[in-house]
Amino acid sequence: MWDLTAAALETAKLRGAKYTDARIMHLRQRDLTTKNGEVGTLAESESVGIGVRALASGAWGFASTDQLTGQGVARCAAKAVAIAKASALAKRGEVKMVDEAAFIDSWQAPLEKDPFEIPLAAQLDLLLKADAAMRAVKGVTLTETDMQFRKIDSWFASSLGSKIHQRKLISGCGIAATSFKESEIQKRSYPNSFGGQYALAGYELIESLDLLRHAPRVADESVALHSALQCPETTGTLLLDGSQLGLQIHESVGHPIELDRVLGQEANFAGTSFLTLDKLNTLKYGSEIVNVVADARLAHGPGLGTFAYDDEGVPAQCTDIIKDGQFRGYLSNRETAKLIGLSRSSGTMRTESWNRLPIIRMTNISLKPGSGTPDELVESTDDGIWMETNRSWSIDDRRYQFQFSTEIGWEIKGGKKVRMLKNPSYSGITTEFWNSCDAICGPKHWTLWGTPNCGKGQPMQTMGTGHGAAPARFRNIKMGTAFAGH
Amino acid sequence: MAMTKHKVEAGALSSPRELKKVIDLVLRLGRLAGAQETEVHLDETIDALTRFANNAIHQNVAEEGVTVSVRTVVDRRTARATTNRVDEDSLRRAVAASLELAHSRPQNPKLLPMPGKQRYREVNRFSRETALLGPEQRARAVKRACEVAMRSGQVAAGIFSSGQSQLAMGNSHGLLATHRQTHAEFSVTMQDDPAASWAKANSGNVRRIDPESLARRASEKAKMAKDAQELPPGKYTVILEPAAVLDLVGFLFYDFAATALEDQRSCLNQRMGKQVFGQNIAIMDDVYHPLQLGAPFDGEGMARERVRLVEAGIPKNLVYSRSSAKKAGKKNTGHGFALPNEYGEAPMNLVFGGGDSSVERMIAGTDRGLLVTRVWYIREVDPYEKIMTGMTRDGLFLVENGKVQKAVRNFRFNQSLIELLQNVQEMGPAVRTTAEEAFEMVVPAMKATGFHFTEPTKF
């Protein structure tokens, strides 16, 4: 592989590139699903190719190819330079980047059990058993399960002299039961909705989730929701489980801190950000107990945003985003760091595949834990609503106004969960929401949730991100608006 | 092999002969490996996208690639393996992987044998000029759009993309289907801080796209969008431009899948044949419509048929795959996804019936309402009543006494699509429309009453 990346760097240099990086990636994926007791998707795929990013005439060009021969790679590199020169026809200044060191390294994410070595029949058997356990509950009308594994090798080389090989393995799975009755569809999922839980881990993740224990509960709740009271339209105390809070962090902290958005580079599609540069170190983002970090290091946990180096060759880092409630940092790359006067990239350039340009992406954007247990959180709440497992999510293009709904809610009275609520939702303004946080549960209840489906960029790229969160409480939150008036 | 050599030399799509050669090779490898049936999909793409922001190009990419996807069947067990390597050893490994997966699963007694040779109606969706569009041409068009912005003191961001692709499939029963097409797209956001507006077009032929005109339209609207005032939430009459219509009604497409009804997750469950929408609503799926793109065959190689989904507001028909048609005792409509899958099928070429009004006439006939340029981040709140939430974006305007009066701060909405399509008062002609949430469709601008805005945002 290194011969091919070297050929790409050499060709680009000869064609006039001032900086080049080349990345060969080999991606292997297995997808399994079941529906109503039958196997649905059963597929494996592999994809290998090279992407070359060249800086020439002060502008960027990127080209990719699956032709992994000396000739194919050279043609790809020459094309990247030609595209860069075309970009210079509509440039307003020279691209500049902060310095970075050269690294020669090889890193493999730890795993205990390689899922590609586990018999497929055993994986399907687990899903079919979970599916059957859900279908055994009367009133369940649709059962779905899924499992996915991805093995990603990347060989990154840059004209700075870096040569970095990384191997990652991602596992994920989830189950869901749906109940249709009269004019209502209710659904419950475990361990999370939209595919379940994902991590930078092997088959040990699947085993740790104990799907068979949770399947009957999930099915029971999907049916019971039909008899539950409608979540009222009210303003009051909201308690969120960790999985929903993880998505709240993703949408209302993770995206607005992306420096490419802040600087207008995503204005046409993903949008911009309310976190304009004047807000750095001046905005009170949240209450004093709110501490958020962007941490790509393995020490943070096996998240979907964990790696050793980003796709620009910058080592993984931990950056304070919100410290004691104050806004402290952005997600940056070498170019945007230079634009705002930082001395170093925060190491967040990531790409979906060999044929996509690396762009600024979330790593693991996590809310640090507080103290106490979920039971203590409920016991210390006189009147509120507990919401868990995301059902829908939406936020405006500057990341101010959001609305989330969840699969299930629980009314809390006098420190106890007293009854189930259906169709719960809450909404608000990002900074008002985070400033209303008055309790976060402790480290034992903190989970690094994986969001496998974050879309950004043109052409669109799907990326996995990590979000550590423990259940937390928020005051004076507007709830129930999504269903009001219907 | 010949295909690889050709791509290296020309950077163009492979010839039909080269495609057939790969398909025949995979089918032969399938037989040799013991597959009782083999199906192969070959997808080839050559794409480029020029991206600009802050009145300059900041990203500019190109890609080329081929994937070969193999499905084998053995003892009523089937599975799929995909690779982007087209040398014989890699294709042999893909066949073996597919068979290994298939052997690991339980039998599916309902699995149908692969279909034989089919007939397809020809569609011509390839434009040589679009296929040959280069980075310099895109850069010059982008520069002109940025100059429109700079002349008005605005900031432009957007994309100009173009490309060509082809799909070929064959199976061991003699089926062979091929399709090639080109595409081009220009999208521009004009920022007139703190306001912004947007325009976008998509076509199989780049000649039908006028980037400068789109830039001027977005620029004019961005000027109008300044000084936005906050209005109270509530139910408003809305004039939805086609992009806003698309990103809302685009969420209805899977509800017309026979499998979605079988699974009881469609909003049309127990509603087929009833007056669900207003009498002025007609929806077809029509891959042959002159404003549509796409192949005239589905994931199993069956010819796509036109289907009248909704007539006079009444859902009349669904789309089917071979399997769902057999289960329902209906005729297959050629809308199946590649097997194996759990979703069955979907209409992918929706065409709404239009009307004889226009956005201008809708505005002129409105005492009080809101003009919506586009909507954003649409998600399903309730799957049966089809309540969708989302935000307005890039230009929301108050219409009073037949005129656009002022810009309005963006709103969140929670709106049932069923109610929306019951409340349509007027429609413009249906046009090919592109936005960001739904795939391209042919939809009209619509004026509708009682659109439910629930909360404003800060801009």
Image (tube, rainbow, N blue to C red):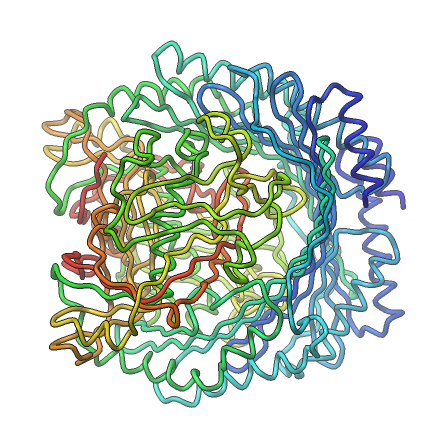
Q: Position of residue A35 (x, y in %)?
A: 51, 76
Side of B121 relative to A6 (left or right): left
* A385 versus B457 height, above or below: below
* B459 or B414: nearer the viewer: B459
Kindly indicate the quadrant of the structure image that contains residue A376.
bottom left
Q: Quadrant of the C terminus of chain A?
A: bottom left
* A234 versus A454 height, above or below: below
Can residue B272 be seen? no
Side of B241 relative to A421 (left or right): right
- Furthest-top residue in view? B151
* A230 or A27: nearer the viewer: A27
Q: Position of residue A63 (x, y in %)?
A: 69, 33
Side of B417 relative to A194 (left or right): left
Kindly indicate the quadrant of the structure image that contains residue B118.
bottom right
Q: Residue at x 55, y 83 (%)?
A: A128
* A235 versus A266 height, above or below: below
Q: Position of residue B333 (x, y in %)?
A: 54, 61
Side of B453 relative to A265 (left or right): left
* B113 or A170: nearer the viewer: A170
Q: Residue at x 45, y 63 (%)?
A: A449
Q: Quadrant of the N terminus of chain A?
A: top right
Q: Position of residue A55 (x, y in %)?
A: 65, 24
Can residue A306 be seen? yes
